[in-house]
Image (cartoon, helix red, strand yellow):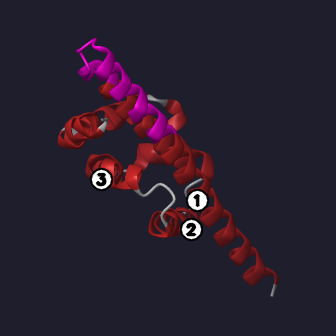
Amino acid sequence: MANRLIERIEKQWEAIAAEVINQLRKDQEAGFYHTLSEEDVRERALDLVRNLGRWLDSGSDAELHLKYEKLGAKRRREGVPLPDVLYKIFLVKRKIRSYAMLSNLEMSAAALYEELELLRRMGQCFDMIACHIARGYCAEESEEERKTAA
Protein backbone atom coordinates (compact mmCIF):
# COMPACT_ATOMS: atom_id res chain seq x y z
CA MET A 1 0.00 0.00 0.00
CA ALA A 2 2.82 2.40 0.77
CA ASN A 3 4.05 2.18 -2.82
CA ARG A 4 1.91 5.12 -3.98
CA LEU A 5 3.35 7.30 -1.25
CA ILE A 6 6.88 6.09 -2.02
CA GLU A 7 6.39 6.99 -5.68
CA ARG A 8 5.26 10.50 -4.71
CA ILE A 9 8.31 10.89 -2.49
CA GLU A 10 10.69 9.67 -5.19
CA LYS A 11 9.18 12.11 -7.69
CA GLN A 12 9.73 14.96 -5.22
CA TRP A 13 13.37 14.08 -4.53
CA GLU A 14 14.58 17.52 -5.65
CA ALA A 15 12.29 19.34 -3.21
CA ILE A 16 13.30 17.02 -0.39
CA ALA A 17 17.00 17.44 -1.26
CA ALA A 18 16.49 21.24 -1.22
CA GLU A 19 15.00 20.93 2.29
CA VAL A 20 18.04 18.90 3.38
CA ILE A 21 20.38 21.54 1.91
CA ASN A 22 18.51 24.38 3.64
CA GLN A 23 18.63 22.57 6.98
CA LEU A 24 22.34 21.76 6.62
CA ARG A 25 23.13 25.39 5.85
CA LYS A 26 21.44 26.73 8.97
CA ASP A 27 22.10 23.90 11.44
CA GLN A 28 25.36 24.14 13.39
CA GLU A 29 25.29 20.39 14.04
CA ALA A 30 25.83 19.73 10.32
CA GLY A 31 29.60 19.96 10.82
CA PHE A 32 31.44 18.80 7.71
CA TYR A 33 28.41 19.23 5.48
CA HIS A 34 28.64 23.02 5.84
CA THR A 35 31.76 22.79 3.65
CA LEU A 36 30.09 21.00 0.74
CA SER A 37 28.53 22.69 -2.25
CA GLU A 38 24.77 22.45 -2.77
CA GLU A 39 25.42 20.14 -5.72
CA ASP A 40 27.48 17.75 -3.57
CA VAL A 41 24.77 17.62 -0.90
CA ARG A 42 22.07 17.17 -3.55
CA GLU A 43 24.00 14.30 -5.12
CA ARG A 44 24.53 12.63 -1.75
CA ALA A 45 20.81 12.87 -0.90
CA LEU A 46 19.72 11.80 -4.38
CA ASP A 47 20.35 8.08 -3.94
CA LEU A 48 18.46 7.82 -0.67
CA VAL A 49 15.39 9.72 -1.84
CA ARG A 50 15.07 8.87 -5.53
CA ASN A 51 15.66 5.17 -4.93
CA LEU A 52 13.70 4.97 -1.68
CA GLY A 53 11.41 2.19 -2.87
CA ARG A 54 14.33 0.08 -4.03
CA TRP A 55 16.16 0.50 -0.73
CA LEU A 56 13.02 -0.20 1.32
CA ASP A 57 12.38 -3.37 -0.66
CA SER A 58 15.95 -4.58 -0.21
CA GLY A 59 16.37 -3.68 3.47
CA SER A 60 18.28 -6.88 4.20
CA ASP A 61 19.94 -7.06 0.81
CA ALA A 62 23.69 -7.74 0.76
CA GLU A 63 24.12 -5.13 -2.02
CA LEU A 64 22.64 -2.43 0.18
CA HIS A 65 24.76 -3.46 3.16
CA LEU A 66 27.94 -3.42 1.09
CA LYS A 67 27.05 -0.08 -0.52
CA TYR A 68 26.69 1.66 2.82
CA GLU A 69 29.70 -0.06 4.39
CA LYS A 70 31.74 1.26 1.45
CA LEU A 71 30.21 4.69 1.96
CA GLY A 72 31.16 4.63 5.65
CA ALA A 73 34.75 3.67 4.77
CA LYS A 74 34.88 6.39 2.11
CA ARG A 75 33.65 9.05 4.55
CA ARG A 76 36.36 7.94 7.02
CA ARG A 77 39.03 8.33 4.32
CA GLU A 78 37.61 11.77 3.50
CA GLY A 79 37.98 12.74 7.15
CA VAL A 80 34.27 13.25 7.76
CA PRO A 81 33.49 12.68 11.45
CA LEU A 82 31.12 9.75 11.96
CA PRO A 83 28.58 11.86 13.89
CA ASP A 84 28.35 14.20 10.87
CA VAL A 85 27.75 11.28 8.50
CA LEU A 86 25.02 9.85 10.72
CA TYR A 87 23.49 13.30 11.27
CA LYS A 88 23.06 13.75 7.53
CA ILE A 89 21.52 10.29 7.06
CA PHE A 90 19.00 10.95 9.82
CA LEU A 91 18.30 14.45 8.47
CA VAL A 92 17.37 12.93 5.11
CA LYS A 93 15.14 10.45 6.93
CA ARG A 94 13.42 13.28 8.86
CA LYS A 95 12.85 15.29 5.68
CA ILE A 96 11.36 12.29 3.87
CA ARG A 97 9.14 11.58 6.87
CA SER A 98 8.00 15.22 7.03
CA TYR A 99 7.21 15.23 3.33
CA ALA A 100 5.26 11.97 3.66
CA MET A 101 3.19 13.32 6.52
CA LEU A 102 2.54 16.71 4.90
CA SER A 103 1.71 15.29 1.48
CA ASN A 104 -0.71 12.70 2.82
CA LEU A 105 -3.67 15.02 3.09
CA GLU A 106 -6.17 12.20 2.83
CA MET A 107 -7.41 11.17 6.25
CA SER A 108 -8.89 7.83 5.27
CA ALA A 109 -7.94 4.73 7.20
CA ALA A 110 -6.19 3.37 4.10
CA ALA A 111 -4.12 6.56 3.65
CA LEU A 112 -3.12 6.61 7.30
CA TYR A 113 -2.16 2.94 7.14
CA GLU A 114 -0.09 3.67 4.03
CA GLU A 115 1.78 6.42 5.86
CA LEU A 116 2.38 4.29 8.96
CA GLU A 117 3.62 1.40 6.84
CA LEU A 118 6.05 3.70 5.05
CA LEU A 119 7.32 5.16 8.32
CA ARG A 120 7.82 1.67 9.76
CA ARG A 121 9.72 0.44 6.72
CA MET A 122 11.77 3.64 6.55
CA GLY A 123 12.74 3.36 10.20
CA GLN A 124 14.03 -0.17 9.71
CA CYS A 125 15.86 0.68 6.50
CA PHE A 126 17.54 3.85 7.76
CA ASP A 127 18.56 2.14 11.00
CA MET A 128 20.21 -0.59 8.94
CA ILE A 129 21.89 2.01 6.70
CA ALA A 130 23.29 3.81 9.74
CA CYS A 131 24.62 0.54 11.20
CA HIS A 132 26.37 -0.39 7.96
CA ILE A 133 27.82 3.09 7.53
CA ALA A 134 29.22 2.87 11.07
CA ARG A 135 30.51 -0.65 10.42
CA GLY A 136 32.36 0.46 7.28
CA TYR A 137 33.64 3.60 8.99
CA CYS A 138 35.01 1.65 11.97
CA ALA A 139 36.55 -1.03 9.75
CA GLU A 140 38.38 1.67 7.79
CA GLU A 141 39.48 3.32 11.02
CA SER A 142 40.84 -0.02 12.29
CA GLU A 143 42.66 -0.56 8.99
CA GLU A 144 44.24 2.90 9.22
CA GLU A 145 45.32 2.21 12.82
CA ARG A 146 46.77 -1.17 11.78
CA LYS A 147 48.78 0.47 9.00
CA THR A 148 49.99 3.21 11.32
CA ALA A 149 51.10 0.69 13.96
CA ALA A 150 53.02 -1.41 11.40
- On screen, 124 above or below 150? above
Task: Please name the predominant secondary structure of the magenta segment in the image.
Answer: helix
Residue at x 35% of width, y 19% of height: 112
**Disc 2 target residue:** 73
**Disc 1 target residue:** 132
Query: 35 and 110: which one is in front?
Result: 110
| Secondary element at image label 3 | loop
Q: Is residue 60 magenta?
A: no
Q: Position of residue 97 (x, y in %)?
A: 39, 29
| Secondary element at image label 2 | helix
Q: Considering only order in the chain, which callout, 2 or 3, is on the residue closer to the N terminus?
A: 3
| Secondary element at image label 1 | helix
Horizontally, is 33 left or right of 3 in the view? right
Q: Split into 4 quadrants, where in the image is the N terminus?
A: top left
Q: Position of residue 40 (x, y in %)?
A: 31, 54
Q: Considering only order in the chain, which callout, 1 or 2, is on the residue closer to the N terminus?
A: 2
Q: Residues within 10 Å of mark 3 (few under 14, many from 20)?
A: some
Mark whose residue sits in front, 3 or 2: 3
**Disc 3 target residue:** 51
Q: Residues within 10 Å of mark 1 (few under 14, many from 20)?
A: many
Cα separation between marks 2 and 1: 10 Å
Q: Split into 4 quadrants, where in the image is the C terminus?
A: bottom right
Report the span colored magenta.
101-123
Amino acid at dot 3: Asn
Q: Considering only order in the chain, which callout, 1 or 3, is on the residue closer to the N terminus?
A: 3
Cα separation between marks 3 and 2: 21 Å
- On screen, 88 above or below 47? above
Amino acid at dot 2: Ala
In the displayed orientation, state which residue is furthest to the right. 149
Labelled pair 3, 2 in contact (Cβ < 8 Å): no
* Number of marks in the rendered image: 3
Q: Residues within 10 Å of mark 2 (few under 14, many from 20)?
A: many
